[in-house]
Amino acid sequence: MEKRVADDFDLKKIAESGQIFRSYEDPSGSFIFMSADKRLLIGQDGNDIHMDCTKEEWDGFWAHYFDLSEDYAAIRKTVKQDPFMERAAEAGKGIRILNQDPWEMLISFIISQRKSIPAIRSCIEKICENFGEKMDGFYAFPTPEALVKADTEVLKYCGVGYRLEYIKDAARRVLCGETDIEGLKSLSDEKLKEHLLEIKGVGNKVADCVMLFGFHRTGASPVDVWVKKIIDEDYNGTDPFPKYGKYAGIMQQYAFFYKRLLKE
DNA sequence: TCCCAGGCGATCT
DNA sequence: AGATCGCATGGG
């Protein structure tokens, strides 16, 4: 189907903004986005987008996935008296915070620690190929049950390294209901974070990423090595993101994208 | 080859 | 509370 979007929307920036590890650029310039057991081929020409799904699938899932009910142009305009963030928001214009699968985000960001983004992507790809359900032309992200049962040696082969026990434990917790993903959705930001921090291998940074990208808590602003650089080099040691309140995570994405862009 | 990556947990002071 | 250290592995 085809559609026209009114708001900021840039598939390439979204795919390269570090929030998703299972996106691929097609030779045609279109993009593949995967989430849990779903996959979409989508391309854009300016504000005209076209995708290989039905209207029902778009309205029922992907429109929310791309966070189309939020007005990002308006959010960008809330930046004032902050030259670095104004440049970041302009550079990152078109980025949106995807509504991704919380379980997939939990495992993905547990894996992400001490890995480069290319390494994270290849590790997750291997895990899907080995433990994800085979769909029509791709592999789904593995279920908690699949990872609980996963052969340890094969998981190691996927490149998870010392995170093996973290992944196993997180999968066990979710499978037995000790971590109730659906239930977590109704918790306050504070309670949600508290719970996430109880999971082995989940510290402050990973918890914030799961909150932001899996539970769409846009007030969460993960502090990673890049954001640390921003804080030190551009803000003299003071974290500028919390002052943006419920948009802190969105500003963080603009800034993260911009800072990495500057280094190229 | 060497360095470091979207950090975390354990173990100290 | 805050500082330090080891950690498995892959990409640049």
Image: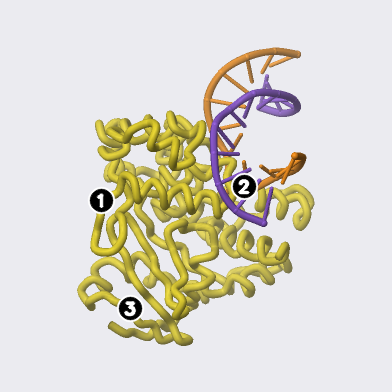
Chain colours: A yellow, B orange, C purple
Tell me which corner region of the image, top left, top right, bottom left or bottom right, holds residue A59: bottom left
In this view, the residue in front, A256 or A29, is A29
Foreground tag (3 vs 2): 3
Check contact, mark 3 vs mark 1: CB within 8 A.
no
SS label for mark 3: strand
Of the numbered discs 2 and 1, the one sitting upstream in the chain is 1
Q: Mark 3 sits on what residue?
A: A51
Mark 1 nearby-residue class (10 Å; few <14, some 14–19, many ≥20) = some
* CB-based contact (under 8 Å), mark 2 and mark 1: no
Residue C2 appears at what percent x and percent y?
A: 72, 28
How far across and how far down the image is residue A106, in percent?
A: 41, 44
Indicate the secondary structure of the residue bearing disc 1: loop
* Image disc number at residue A224: 2
Q: Are marks 3 and 2 on the same chain?
A: yes
Residue to which mark 1 is pinned: A133
**Image point 37% across, 71% down: which residue?**
A69
> Looking at the image, which residue is at 27% across and 73% down?
A58
